[in-house]
Amino acid sequence: MSRRRRAALLLGLALVLGTLAASDVARREAALRDQVGPAVEVLVAREPLRAGRRVEPDDLAVRRLPERFAPAGAPAVPELVVGERLAVAVPAGAPVGEHLLERAAGATPVMRRGERAAEVVARGSPELIAPGGRVDVVVTSERGDGGSGEARLALEDVEVLSARPVPSSAREGAGPQVAATLLVTVRQAVYLAAAASFAGDIRLLARPPGDRRRAGVAAVGADLTVLAD
């Protein structure tokens, strides 16, 4: 066998082995992705944080982790932890969530079957929106051109489990904001999650103590036309 033919055979064998190896690596990577899940965003500490420290915006960073290794129920929403004190020390790069805060050590609210605790950052009065109170939720949609769309009374008579003002350094836009945990149904929790991602504005309207009356359907268009009441 000539040297040229032998070299061609060796080259062909190398290509076949390389293709098989690449295919095997691709299969292993796909299997690993199936096991750990897609990447999700998680709040982490930029540097070591001591217990008792009040969390500041610069203390936090967002990192993408495989879903399997991300803390359960820990959305990457800085407003939910900024301004609160840590109950424990947090190493650099470790996830930071509400479960690490001093206020999480208090009594756990009782939830019935079918209920969920949904976190939302919305415009509202920090003085009037407090744990144990009740609120209505108004959601304003966003038009395709970026302007405000229809404002609609989305949820009524929702119990507030926890609430605190969002520090001015951590919020965007004008007007006070609160980070609140609301006691809602599963469907309402899914709606609030979608509103947080796609709505132009979310507002919490404090209800007077003892007022459990329903207002019914209410919506106003961008031109201030009453669409329903």
Image (spheres, rainbow, N blue to C red):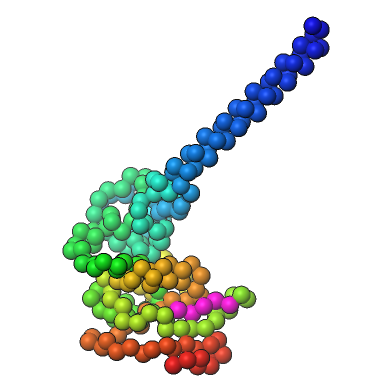
Residue placed furthest toward the left: 107
Q: Considering only vertical position in the picture, is 21 above or below 163?
A: above
Most common SS among magenta residues:
strand
> Is residue 143 something one can see in this rendering?
yes
Image point 70% across, 24% down: which residue?
A: 15
Residue 21 is situated, as x and y percent measured from the top left of the image, at 60, 27
Residue 110 is situated, as x and y percent measured from the top left of the image, at 21, 67
Q: Number of numbered discs present?
A: 0
Image point 29% across, 89% down: which residue?
A: 213
Which quadrant: the N terminus? top right
Q: Considering only vertical position in the picture, is 189 above or below 102?
A: below
Image point 69% across, 19% down: which residue?
A: 13
Residue placed furthest toward the top: 1
Between residue 104 and residue 57, name the one nearer to us. 104
The quadrant where residue 106 appears: bottom left
Q: Along the horizontal axis of the image, is 191 left or right of 115?
A: right
Query: What span is in magenta?
Result: 139-143
Image point 75% across, 16% down: which residue?
A: 9
Q: Is residue 137 magenta?
A: no
Residue 116 is situated, as x and y percent measured from the top left of the image, at 31, 66
> Is residue 174 something one can see in this rendering?
no
Which quadrant: the C terminus? bottom left
Q: Along the horizontal axis of the image, is 46 left or right of 18?
A: left
Between residue 149 and residue 98, name the one nearer to us. 149
Between residue 76 and residue 108, name the one nearer to us. 108
Residue 118 is situated, as x and y percent measured from the top left of the image, at 34, 67
